[in-house]
């Protein structure tokens, strides 16, 4: 392979390298004047992609990095199917409807899963749709009562950034209940002071981005029940089940986080996380059809019948949603439980081994009754070490491991943690290799005292905050 730079009028032009099968240079930021043989361009693109990190060592992402061959075949089959065209692809629309009802049954929707919902590109779109429905229901109720609708607010715990986007895009005040050092999630008592007559709803997170732990949905709903009896305020709940909604039904079915709580009016999830589908799939469901305001729904006709459409994105391939249907049918409850419990086993092994090392304190240890397959830890306050968590994360990257370090949100920002997400395909053997590299990293810092610690910005790890 030959590397070359091109100069025009004394200035260096940004260029790609030339292939051993070409005699010209491809520009980086301009479309070439002529077409090129596909194998040449494929060679160039593949070589650049080799510079990406190893997906199996990416412990930061919630998204699946393991795909069965059958999923690739289904994605290829559906690559040209625009699933929004429900009149052109009626069977795809039917399969989407089946997925909604299967999830409704999985999440204990009333009336045997006869709920309403839609697939989405991911949980961010699903959250937007759930939030819009809350907002429209609140506006309608206030308008009918002759009350003002100019100061809506949304109460949440420490949430993923998609809820900040929702609040900003729809001009809604986001009242985010801050963490405290001894309370790393929204509790019922901490939530109640933030609620008033302008609250459009409460969002609970079932699998916090920061730690992996579940917020107490049932207790929050019970607190809102008591609030209604006392004040008359009827506040609905949306469960952001991005990860936990596709884990708890199989691994901790006793947790009442879902539609078993009458106050839960909608639930969203990322299927491309623990739903085990390729990237780009999510779902949002509403408890009853009345919980989705009809003003938000567009209706199309197909095969002489009515098909409702409520999505922000328009054109998108059907493959990811079809893969969700395939996985639900193929794995069943038993298969999902087997896969997720193996992830929990690896997470608990990592938590136990990291706790033995001395300087670390485990904040969440991968308990299925408390959160998703993940673990979170911090340095002990009395840890006699020269490194900080950013230094440790940066050193692990030398061996290819992406284990993010980041500070917690407001009121707990002095706590810096590391977090690992354990997904399908991460075996106990891989976990053992990671622990060996933890020991190597500790030994490195024993032999090399850190003079100036890294900052969060310098560490540069993506943590999905």
Image (spheres, rainbow, N blue to C red):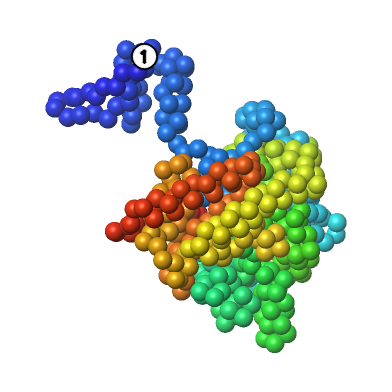
Q: Residue furthest right?
A: 112
Q: Residue furthest bottom?
A: 230
Res 459 visible: no
The quadrant of the picture occupied by the N terminus is: top left
Quarter location, residue 457 = bottom left
Q: Residue at x 72, y 45 (%)?
A: 339
Q: Nearer the viewer, residue 25 or 317?
A: 25
Residue 221 appears left or right of 171: right
| 343 in relation to 202, above or below | above
The crowding category of the residue bearing disc 1, from other C-alpha atoms within 10 Å (few below 14, some 14 to 19, many at least 20), is few
Q: Residue at x 47, y 53 (%)?
A: 404
Residue 384 appears left or right of 369: left
Residue 49 appears left or right of 146: left
Tag 1's secondary structure?
Answer: loop
Image position, residue 346 (x, y; %): 64, 50
| 186 in relation to 405, above or below | below
Res 446 visible: yes
Quarter location, residue 221 = bottom right
Q: Nearer the viewer, residue 24 or 94?
A: 24
Image position, residue 249 (x, y; %): 76, 56
Tag 1 residue: 20
Q: Residue at x 59, y 42 (%)?
A: 430
Q: Residue at x 32, y 57 (%)?
A: 450
Image position, residue 127 (x, y; %): 60, 57
Image position, residue 141 (x, y; %): 66, 73
């Amino acid at each position: 392979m030959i590397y070359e730079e091109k100069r025009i009028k004394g200035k260096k032009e940004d260029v790609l390298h030339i292939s051993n099968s070409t005699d010209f240079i491809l520009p980086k930021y301009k479309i070439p004047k002529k077409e090129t043989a596909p194998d040449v361009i494929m060679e160039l693109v593949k070589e650049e992609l080799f510079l990406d990190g190893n997906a199996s060592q990416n412990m930061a992402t919630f998204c699946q990095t393991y795909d069965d061959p059958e999923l690739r075949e289904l994605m290829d089959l559906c690559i040209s199917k625009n699933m929004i065209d429900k009149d052109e692809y009626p069977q795809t629309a039917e399969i989407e409807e089946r997925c909604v009802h299967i999830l409704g049954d999985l999440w204990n929707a009333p009336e045997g899963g006869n709920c309403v919902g839609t697939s989405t590109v991911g949980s961010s779109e699903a959250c937007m749709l759930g939030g819009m429905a809350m907002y429209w229901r609140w506006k309608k109720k206030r308008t009918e009562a002759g009350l003002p609708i100019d100061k809506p607010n949304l109460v949440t715990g420490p949430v993923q950034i998609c809820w900040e986007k929702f609040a900003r895009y729809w001009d809604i005040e986001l009242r985010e209940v801050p963490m405290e050092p001894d309370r790393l999630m929204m509790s019922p008592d901490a939530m109640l002071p933030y609620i008033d007559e302008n609250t459009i709803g409460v969002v609970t997170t079932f699998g916090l981005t920061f730690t992996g732990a579940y917020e107490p949905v049932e207790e929050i709903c019970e607190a809102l029940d008591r609030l209604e009896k006392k004040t008359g305020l009827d506040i609905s709940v949306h469960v952001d089940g991005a990860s936990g909604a596709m884990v708890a039904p199989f691994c901790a079915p006793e947790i009442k986080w879902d539609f078993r709580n009458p106050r839960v009016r909608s639930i969203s999830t990322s299927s491309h996380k623990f739903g085990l589908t390729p990237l780009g799939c999510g779902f949002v469901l509403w408890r009853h059809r009345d919980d989705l305001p009809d003003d938000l729904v567009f209706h199309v006709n197909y095969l002489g019948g009515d098909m409702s459409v409520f999505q922000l994105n328009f054109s998108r391939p059907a493959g990811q949603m079809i893969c969700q249907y395939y996985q639900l049918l193929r794995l069943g409850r038993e298969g999902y439980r087997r896969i997720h419990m193996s992830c929990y086993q690896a997470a608990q092994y990592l938590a136990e081994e990291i706790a033995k090392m001395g300087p670390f304190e485990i904040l969440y240890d991968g308990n299925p009754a408390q959160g998703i397959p993940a673990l979170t830890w911090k340095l002990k306050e009395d840890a006699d070490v020269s490194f900080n968590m950013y230094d440790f994360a940066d050193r692990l990257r030398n061996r290819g491991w992406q284990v993010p370090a980041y500070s917690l949100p407001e009121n707990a920002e002095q706590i810096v943690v590391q977090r690992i997400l354990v997904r399908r395909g991460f075996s106990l053997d891989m976990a053992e290799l990671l622990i060996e590299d933890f020991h190597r990293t500790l030994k490195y810092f024993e032999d090399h005292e850190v003079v100036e610690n890294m900052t969060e910005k310098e560490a540069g790890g993506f943590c999905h905050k």
